[in-house]
């Protein structure tokens, strides 16, 4: 059966799409598959995070080291959450087992959702908020120039 896929998640911000299509494509795909496969959504969220960190100039030989580097550069509410994306993504990509039962750890609905929530907050931090600030500063600087005053510092 073929039918159009849809998502209840917010669309990828245009600021992200303009800067890095790979990030926006991974996010959109994760949102589309979330209702069908929590593992796929979590793995795509992990990939999206790594691409976002690379876009910010953070490139190590593995995501864990990249997260270690960026944690001090983020607000505490984000630094406390980004390693969860990596961990949940690892549950999706690798057959990690519970020590006591030997069962494979599955990605749960709330975990995939949380990964996407954190990505959305990172989008705002890295792309949306700086662009809004740039626009607002530009508008105010035009006003200042029209009055003969110096631009904002």
Image (spheres, rainbow, N blue to C red):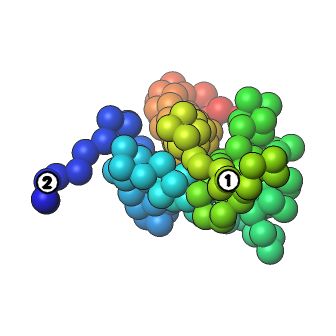
Residue at disc 1, secondary structure: loop
What residue appears at the point 71 percent right and 59 percent down from the top-left corner?
Answer: 96
Q: For the residues marked 1 and 2, what is the alpha-carbon distance in whole angstroms?
A: 34 Å
Seen at 48% across and 58% down, the residue is 40
The disc label shown at residue 103, or none:
1
In this rendering, does residue 71 appear at all?
Answer: yes
Residue in the foreground of this view, choosing between 141 and 5: 5
* Residue 119 in view: no
* Percent coordinates x, y for residue 34 in the rendering: 41, 47
The label nearer to you, 1 versus 2, is 1
40 on left or right of 66: left
When the figure is inspected, residue 126 is found, relative to residue 143, above or below; the finding is below
Instruction: Please state the horizontal and vertical placement of residue 18, each as a whole percent of the image.
Output: 42, 58
Q: Is residue 15 left or right of residue 59?
A: left
Q: Is residue 145 above or below residue 4?
A: above
Between 57 and 138, the one lying in front of the other is 57
- Residue 105 percent across, percent down from the top left: 66, 51
The residue that mark 2 highlights is 3
**Label 1 crowding class (10 Å Cα cut-off): few <14, some 14-19, many 20+?**
few
Q: Earlier in the sequence, mark 1 or mark 2?
A: 2
Assess disc 2: are there few (<14), some (14-19) or many (≥20) residues with their C-alpha within 10 Å of its C-alpha.
few
Q: Image height check: is 124 above or below 102?
A: above
Secondary structure type for disc 2: loop
């Amino acid at each position: 059966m073929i039918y159009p896929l849809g998502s209840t998640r917010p669309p990828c911000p245009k600021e992200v799409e303009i800067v890095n299509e790979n990030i926006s494509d991974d996010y959109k795909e994760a949102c589309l598959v979330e209702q069908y496969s929590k593992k796929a959504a979590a793995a795509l969220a992990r990939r999206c995070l790594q691409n976002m960190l690379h876009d910010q100039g953070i490139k190590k030989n593995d995501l864990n080291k990249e997260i270690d580097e960026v944690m001090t550069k983020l607000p505490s509410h984000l630094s406390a959450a980004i390693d969860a994306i990596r961990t949940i993504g690892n549950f999706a990509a690798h057959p990690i087992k519970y020590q006591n039962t030997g069962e494979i750890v599955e990605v749960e609905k709330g975990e995939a959702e949380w990964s996407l929530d954190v990505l959305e907050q990172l989008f705002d931090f890295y792309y949306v908020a700086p662009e809004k600030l740039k626009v607002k500063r530009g508008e105010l600087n035009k006003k200042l120039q029209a009055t003969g005053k110096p631009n904002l510092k």
